[in-house]
Amino acid sequence: MPSKKHLHIESSGQLCIYCGACVGVCPLNCVYLDETRITFDEKICTRCEICVKACPVGAIAIG
Amino acid sequence: MVENLTTDVLVVGAGPAGSMAAKWAAKSGARVLMIEKRQEIGSPVRCGEGMSKDWLKEVGIVPSQRWINVEVEGARIFSPSEKVLEINEKHAGNEVGYVVERDAFDKQLAIDAGNAGVDVLLKTAATGVIRENGKIVGVKAKRFGEPFEIRAPVTIGADGFESQFGRWAGLPTNLALKDMDSCLQYRMTNVDCDVRYCDFYLGSVAPGGYVWIFPKGEGLANVGIGVQLSQIHGTAEPKKYLDAWIAKHPAYSKGKTIDVVGGGVSIAPPLKQTVTDGVMLVGDAARMIDPLTGGGIANGCIAGKICGEVAAEAVREKTPTKEFFQKYEKGWRARLEEKLYRNWLAKEKLCSLSDATFDKVVDALEGVKLQKLSVHNILKAVHDKYPDVTREFESFL
């Protein structure tokens, strides 16, 4: 079983502009924008990286 | 503890489409509750703030200096080599019009809704749907962090691009990568913009989208970009493209940024289904943004009025069913679907054009007085000068 890459969301206020693009593009509906915090459901996420590309400011990183 | 609520029509989202649906549902006699997850209506918004004006009267919006920043005379389209095509207001009146202050505009629409009898709750987010016998009868919500329930025979999903409500309701609103743009915008002061025009820069400077300059006043403009998701391969690309464009344009590189907004925009064909039992979707949540221009306010409001009226009728008739809501489907599609589909086809072609081809298109149109800004007229003019370019577009002619 391949090891899952870690999805790291830099939403501690440094990069995230709380625009919600990541929420809207996720094909599995597993990214959430709760007020000023982006979270995601690790159990559902398949690391497709669409949210990574969709973020206009590059606030989401996988690694 | 927050008490549970019941109403006739629940509107999720207090953007333009939501406020419009709420207002017209109330004016048609329904009890309406509109909820908004933000603490403030109208801010933040991800929007270039440019909009046409010929549709305002139809939905009961009175133009006001409180939210009109600039009334533009026309549009300028810049090719990759920056040849300019000027489109005069008379010819493009249906496409340009005002640059607005969305903050004040959205608040005014909410004020109109409130004055029509709509109840409004801020800092209230929908967190899920309530189903009974398989049908949606309301939403689970949180108000200032406290969970509670709102029940209503009709719920209108007006919760924007990142809409969750539609997906919870089982309506397929997911987008293909080529049907989305990721956008970033700086509101900048101390720039040399021309308050007479909205400017659009096409080509590889903004793959599958464009750079826009929408003037908000002397020396103040929204400077933004949209990039097609299928053409993005790395991270933060919209920002990279926008920063690179600004760096190459001294009129804007001297600007001071006073606001940064970003977001996703759908550039999709019309959805096959926007209703189900107890539910109607409207606006960006229903993928009603124009796929060619990225403009969603007009379509959201036009559909919003129809939605609100149908919602109130469904309450009166006690028939909040998918079958009854076909009245809404037919209504908004009659008004919007053909243009949405046609513009999506045009976008599909335009997103694949090379810079050289874009230059030819703008070159062919230079000096041509377009009777009316339409895809058909543009292609006809291009065909006369560069027939090889239009071979691909033959189905449009």
Image (tube, coloured by chain):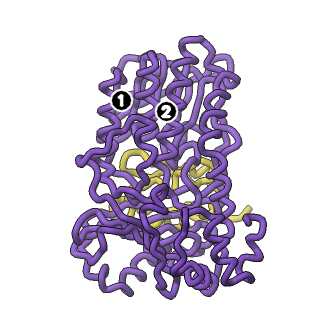
Chain colours: A yellow, B purple
The residue under label 1 is which amino acid type? Ala
Residue positioned 60% across, 41% down in the render: B335
Q: Secondary structure at mark 2?
A: helix
Quarter assignment of residue B248:
bottom left
What residue did someone put label 1 on? B113
- Residue B171: where, in percent of width, then height? 66, 38
Q: Is residue B63 left or right of residue A10?
A: left
Q: Is residue B172 left or right of residue A14?
A: right
Residue B160: assigned label? none
What residue did someone put label 2 on? B305
Q: Chain of mark 2?
A: B
- Residue B115: where, in percent of width, then height? 30, 25
Judging depth in this view, the residue of B330 and B205 nearest the camera is B330
- Residue B319: where, in percent of width, then height? 63, 15
Residue positioned 60% across, 79% down in the render: B361
Q: Are marks 2 and 1 in contact (CB under 8 Å)?
A: no
